[in-house]
Image: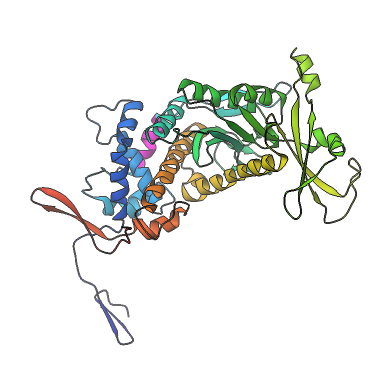
Amino acid sequence: MFSPKLVMLTNTYMKLLNSPQLSAFGGMNFVLEFLTNKGIPRVLNRHLPKMSNQAKYSWSDIFYGMSIIYLCGGKYLEDINSHLRPHFEDNPYIKLPSSDTITRRLKQLAVDNQTGRAKRGEVDHQFNVNDLLSDLNVHILKQTGCLDQPVLTLDYDNTIIFNEKQDSNMTYKRDYGYQPGVCTINEDQILYVENRNGNSDAKTLQADTLQRVFELIDKHKIPQPNHFRADAASYQFDVIDLVQSKVKYFYIGCRNSYVEKYFSQVTHWTKLNDDIEVGQIDFTPFLRQAKENKTQPKRYRLVVKRSPKDSKQVDLMTQTAYDYRAIITNNFGLTPVEVAHFYNHRGNMERQFDILKNDFGWNQMPFSSIKYNQVFLVFTAMIRNLFKMIIHHFSKKCTNLNANCRLKRFIFTWIILPCKWVKSARIKKLRIYGKINFTT
């Protein structure tokens, strides 16, 4: 029978003794200190609605509370009550709120959904645009210097978050969920998030979404982006017409059904790797749309990639046994190989979605409606942005970290450190029980 006081193994004794409460997440104190020194609480409290004087928790407490959940390995907001609260009692950096307080405060930031239809559509599309939080995200990116880069590259993509929320609709994957649109800047930072219902696929009303992205950029006087990349859902006249007026160069995947008639016109192919070849031609698409809009058709560059089919089956349209992929761009300066390599980097969007879904709660949204979950998605995206900066900072100080490691390794290496706050000479001091491998 198990004894709560004494456990006996082979030649081993374990004795349970009462001791003062220790925190298992001592490394989180360094993270909170780092964020505070970066001025994050000041930005939050300045740009979010003013709290009453009687409010027990500030916006920085709410934001830090959510950050603690994910940076300490939690998956749900309720983890703050069941697992984390005892570890952050009397912490000088935060008054840790309950999950109920966090959800109540997040709901206060929600705005109503908007509804729209495609030009020739008959389906109502539901989406949520929260300008307050979009502005806040940009303010935090500016505060941390993420936008002070000589070259800015935008990537846009949509992802499906499968769920059975009260208002979720059927996606093209034949399951219920949401399909938010996300724009990143320089591959690692989330610039914009717009929650959409599941029946609103990536191509539907995309020009409207991108218009809001560029309005946000203009509003905050962010320098004109140098590059824009997107997949074939962006191969639309309205999207390309908008993007080329807002960025220097764009690179957009093409739908084969629209451009495969040009593939046979490519005469010169260059090896990209052992299996893939790259070629190019100049072409003028969207003739009908340009005529309808009374604009002059524009000439672009079509960069085509091909690889041999495993089946060796000859295609009826191209009369070759190759699989083709194409990219439309207005950059005539790069070689076809350079365009292909640069466009391939937009695959990092899938990595961002994986991180957001599995490390920062996007697969466990707490609310039952689009408008409330929009607030949650943006808040967790801001935490993910800050984590990128956090890991970059602490990887310079700890020999066991690198700037590209995932959250779990950061937690095991840095966050899980037994500690206790002690008061000495009327000053609170952090006592760490363990060893951190600092660099010299």
Q: Nearer the viewer, residue 237 or 270?
A: 270
Examine the structure image and report whether residue 104 is included in the region drawn in magenta.
yes
Q: Is residue 78 visible?
A: no
Q: Quadrant of the N terminus?
A: bottom left
Magenta stretch secondary structure, dominant: helix
* Left or right relative to 394: residue 267: right
Q: Quadrant of the C terminus?
A: bottom left
Query: Which residue appears at 67% of the width and 22% of the height?
Result: 241
Query: Which residue appears at 34% of the width and 44% of the height?
Result: 65
Location of residue 48 (image quadrant): top left
Q: Start and end of the magenta stretch?
A: 100-108
User: What percent of the width, then of the height, locates residue 375?
Assistant: 45, 34
User: What percent of the width, then of the height, locates residue 190?
Assistant: 50, 37
Identify the residue at the far bottom of this view.
11
Establish if 84 lies above or below 211.
Answer: below
* Left or right relative to 398: residue 294: right
* Left or right relative to 375: residue 250: right
Q: Is residue 271 visible?
A: yes
Identify the residue at the far left of this view.
425
Establish if 238 lies above or below 10.
Answer: above
User: What percent of the width, then of the height, locates residue 77?
Assistant: 40, 46
Examine the structure image and report whether residue 369 is included in the region drawn in magenta.
no
